[in-house]
Amino acid sequence: MEKKLRIIKILDNNTLIGKGGTDEDITQGSKFTIVGKNDGEEIIDPETKESLGFLGLEKGTVVADQVEEHFTVYKSQFIEEKNKYSRLARNSSLLSSASMHGLIDINEKIPAHYQRLNVNLDEITGSNEESTIKIGDYLRQID
């Protein structure tokens, strides 16, 4: 499989630009996984000995947001606002009254947001971990 789609620009920690657009039949809303350009094991065809590419480390998921002829703007997945409920045990050593011992409920509102991508912060224009998204990483369609 020839890898034509790759990251060419990082705008911020939830917006990327990738090579390929309508010329590669990308449509708005299509999902892609980001795969490292040299990460993982090289897959070799046992009969032809031809390299078929790398079984790369998956680094994140993006959605085609704005598709142009030769490039696409990708956004990380959008996470809707939701309520998070937690039940915590009260610390009995800090409470003086026996009647206050027990459980407390916490209701926390998590605002809607784009999932943060683990991008290489030095390559943002407009980390050294292997899972950091970098210019040149590939995009693989997943729908």
Image (spheres, rainbow, N blue to C red):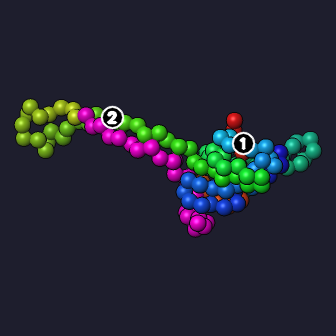
What's drawn in magenta, residue-wise? 105-128
Crowd band around label 1 with a 10 angstrom C-alpha radius: few (<14), some (14–19), many (20+): some
Tell me if residue 142 comes above or below residue 24 in the rendering: above
30 in the magenta segment: no
Q: Quadrant of the image for the C terminus?
A: top right
Q: Amino acid at mark 1?
A: Thr
- Numbered circle sitting on residue 85: 2
Label 1: element kind: loop
Label 2: element kind: strand
108 in the magenta segment: yes
Q: Residue at x 79, y 43 (%)?
A: 25
Please name whichever residue, 50 or 85, is drawn nearer the observer in this view of the structure: 85
In this rendering, which labeled residue sits more in front, label 2 or label 1?
Answer: 1
Q: Earlier in the sequence, mark 2 or mark 1?
A: 1
Crowd band around label 2 with a 10 angstrom C-alpha radius: few (<14), some (14–19), many (20+): few
x and y percent of residue 136 in the render?
A: 71, 59
Q: Is residue 43 left or right of residue 57?
A: right
Q: Residue at x 18, y 32 (%)?
A: 102
x and y percent of residue 72 in the render?
A: 70, 52
Tell me if residue 27 comes above or below residue 126 in the rendering: above
Q: Tell me how far mark 2 sits from mark 1, CA to CA.
A: 37 Å
- Numbered circle sitting on residue 27: 1
Q: Amino acid at mark 2?
A: Tyr
x and y percent of residue 133 in the render?
A: 62, 56
Q: Quadrant of the image for the N terminus?
A: top right
